[in-house]
């Protein structure tokens, strides 16, 4: 079990940081022009690991704990499960707790291969009261390519989000997300880079509530072990 967690930690670290890649996610010109806020993570196994602490610049801090498990029956039917719990404290004095989970099932027999996954979801509470929800779901095309779309709501504020696999200067998509784009009314207002050094950039016109939602959504997106992403 310990070796499994170590292997998963190395896989996740590789997917987030890349072995030799420093590809930067595509962002809108407006977001790319904003100050870069570093997201630092202090976890186990030389990477993120199964638990640790994080900080978003000097504005937010927190702790996380996560795990991912897989099981298989005779190589035909399999399932994956991912979970995370994190606490997030803002410099302004707000405190949130997020509890996340997701499941994926698969069936492989000869030329028949099928998979299905529930949305990866997080319940967000503040002082024991539910104040929001995070959700992201994978959508696969007939050609096998996949995209992930979702949203976060926090204290009445909703922000849409999606994975970004296109790198600057490249016409092709990466296999793993390079980051996450956050939008309001169809316009990108923030971007969280997860390939290489983790960073966050946001438009200055967003409100404090929108910023809180984007930061909580960034943590849920970047630090979770999602079953359909760690295979």
Image (cartoon, rainbow, N blue to C red):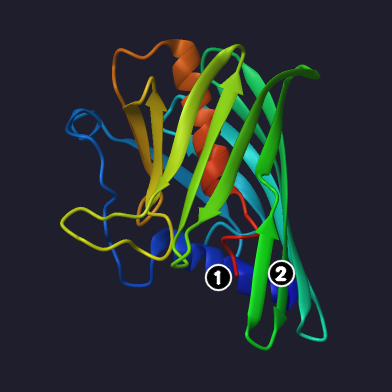
Task: State the count of labels.
Answer: 2
Query: Under tag 1, what secondary structure?
Result: helix
Q: Which residue is drawn at 70% across and 80% down?
A: 108
Residue 5 in picture, x, y percent from top left: 70, 69
Front residue of 63 and 118: 118
- Quadrant that contains the N terminus: bottom right
Give the numbered dot on residue 10. Answer: 1
Q: Can residue 46 be seen in this view?
A: no
Q: Which residue is drawn at 53% across and 12% down?
A: 92
Residue lying at the far right of the rendered structure: 73
Q: Residue at x 68, y 55 (%)?
A: 117
Check disc 2 and report the residue beneath it. 106
Badge 2 crowding class, 10 Å Cα cut-off, few under 14, some 14 to 19, many 20 or more, is: some
User: Counting residues from the N terminus, which is met first, the one under dot 2 or under dot 1?
Assistant: 1
Residue 134 in picture, x, y percent from top left: 62, 33
Answer above or below: position of 118 versus 89.
below
Query: Under tag 2, what secondary structure?
Result: strand
Comparing labels 2 and 1, the label whose residue is closer to the camera? 2
Answer above or below: position of 81 versus 193.
below
Residue 227 in picture, x, y percent from top left: 65, 59
| Residue 30 placement: quadrant | top left
Front residue of 54 and 183: 183
Give the numbered dot on residue 85. Answer: none
Asked if the residue under mark 1 is in contact with the one under mark 2, i.e. CB atoms within 8 Å, the reply is no
- Quadrant that contains the C terminus: bottom right
Q: Which residue is drawn at 43% across and 61% down?
A: 176
| Residue 6 placement: quadrant | bottom right
Answer above or below: position of 79 versus 63.
below
Q: How far apart are marks 2 and 1 (CA)?
A: 23 Å
Q: Is residue 228 visible?
A: yes
């Amino acid at each position: 079990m310990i070796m499994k967690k170590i292997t998963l930690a190395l896989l996740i670290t590789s997917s987030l940081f890349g072995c030799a890649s420093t590809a930067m996610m595509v962002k809108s010109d407006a977001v790319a022009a904003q100050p870069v806020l570093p997201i630092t993570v202090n976890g186990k196994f030389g990477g993120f690991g199964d638990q640790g602490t994080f900080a978003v610049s000097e504005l937010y801090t927190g702790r996380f704990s996560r795990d991912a498990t897989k099981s298989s029956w005779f190589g035909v039917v399999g399932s994956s499960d991912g979970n995370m719990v994190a606490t997030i404290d803002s410099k302004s004095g707000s405190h949130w707790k997020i509890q996340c989970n997701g499941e994926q099932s698969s069936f492989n027999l000869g030329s028949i291969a099928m998979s299905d996954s529930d949305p990866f979801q997080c319940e967000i509470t503040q002082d024991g009261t539910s104040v929001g929800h995070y959700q992201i779901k994978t959508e696969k095309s007939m050609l096998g390519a996949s995209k992930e779309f979702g949203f976060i709501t926090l204290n009445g504020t909703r922000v849409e989000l999606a994975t970004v696999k296109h790198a600057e200067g490249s016409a092709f998509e990466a296999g793993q997300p390079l980051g996450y784009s956050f939008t309001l009314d169809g316009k990108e207002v923030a971007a969280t880079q997860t390939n290489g050094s983790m960073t966050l950039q946001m438009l200055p016109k967003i409100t404090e509530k929108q910023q809180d939602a984007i930061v909580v959504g960034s943590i849920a997106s970047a630090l979770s072990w999602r079953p359909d992403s760690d295979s």
